[in-house]
Amino acid sequence: MEPQLQPRTPATDSGNPEQGAFPPGKPERDPSWLWMNNDGLRSGWSAALFVALYYLITPFLDTIAVTIDPQLVENSYSPFQVLIAESIPLLTILAVGLLMAGIEHRHLTDYHLSGTRRMRHFAGGLATGFGALSVLIAALAAGGWIHFGHVALNPAQAFGFGSVWACAFLFVGFFEEGSFRCYLLYTLKRGINFWWALAIVAGLCLLLAASRDPKGSSGVFLIAALGVVPCWLVHRMRTESSGFWQAAWATSTAFGYFHTNNNGENAIGVFAAALIGFAFCVSVRVTGSAWWAIGCHAAWDWAETFFYGTPDSGFVAQRHFLTTSPAGSALWSGGTDGPEGSLLVVPVILLLVLALLVLYGRHALKPFADEAMRRPD
């Protein structure tokens, strides 16, 4: 008697993927999960694409600018040349930001540029940035680590050149905050955890360790080390805000790494850049946008470079208002790095964070405290 043939069912037919090549309950995984999730393009790919596009487009715009004005290669740090030079990276991240917003189906303002009281926060940042830098200058003067000279400009010149410098440093504020506290912070926080943050930070440290001419690299190593334990604890708490603080650690370390490209930096100056980068991340957390950080960043640089006439990462500006010179030990005066290279910059930045928490943090950080209270055992 011949055996009875059994009909082939989708669960047993392995010849056709569309007819049950996989057992019940184990559907075929779409390979797009590698780069897509429910939130769209995965945050790691978005951040990598943003950085890659920036470094692809910038040389092209640099070439155009130098062709139009060959004097830009001289790096004279004059107000008009800085204004032109800083417009290039700003235009680049604006173009890249618009492109990424289109890819991710977002609006440009979604990247920490929306929120309430934007202009009020921006004005508050301007005032705080100028005030904080002035406190640092006052501390240097009180200790005898900075000496004031003559006023370099008459009132009309001060107004004219001060306005150009103000525009230039607004460009700096928009570019650096737009890159690190707007796009990268927003993008990384939606998909990062402690291990990815650690990988980013460790990778940056390895790049510096392999560099032939690291400038102030120990400042990056220090901010990287200081973030390990707090970020691990936040990770263990499993709060909804964990991604934000992991992204803050990664982007602040990257911000310090970015400043090692400046020829006049020392280790304290690089650490200060990373630390104030973290302060700006805190400002995003407590104000709801990057507008305070943009204003503070621009005013800090304007006061340092133009108003007080001190070195900024080793650069001494032309057409500055006051004339100052460092004196005594470079550890306290900052030496050729300027006030940002002084050890006194650290307590000033910590006071800046304290001021943020006092002015804006009472209500903004309450959800984070509530999350900590609800964390699982």
Image: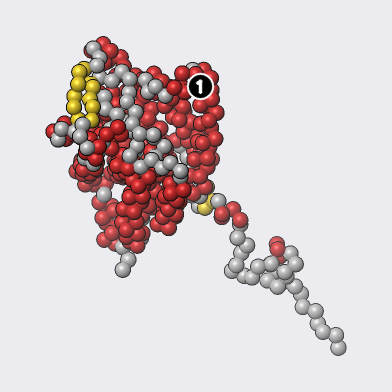
Q: How many marks?
A: 1
Q: Quadrant of residue 289?
A: top left
- 19 vs 189, nearest the viewer: 189
Residue 60 visible (yes or no)? yes
Which residue is most to the left? Answer: 142
Q: Does residue 125 sit above or below 318 in this rendering?
A: below
Q: Secondary structure at mark 1?
A: helix
- 129 vs 8, nearest the viewer: 129
Residue 102: % across, % down: 52, 37
Which residue is most to the bottom? Answer: 1
Residue 122: % across, % down: 29, 32
Which residue corresponds to the image point at 26% horizontal and 24% vertical from the top-left? 309
Which residue corresponds to the image point at 31% horizontal and 36% vertical from the top-left? 293
Image quarter (top left, top right, bottom left or bottom right) of the N terminus: bottom right
Residue 119: % across, % down: 30, 30
Q: Quadrant of residue 185?
A: top left
Q: Is residue 173 left or right of residue 70?
A: left
Q: Is residue 251 left or right of residue 323?
A: right
Which residue corresponds to the image point at 28% horizontal and 20% vertical from the top-left? 320
- 304 vs 362, nearest the viewer: 304
Which residue is most to the right? Answer: 1
Q: Is residue 289 left or right of residue 363?
A: right
Q: Which amino acid type is marked by label 1?
A: Val
- 326 vs 19, nearest the viewer: 326
Mark 1 sits on what residue?
A: 66
> Dot 1 surroundings within 10 Å: few (below 14), some, or many (20 or more)?
few
Q: Is residue 14 left or right of residue 291?
A: right
Residue 244 visible (yes or no)? no
Residue 205: % across, % down: 42, 50
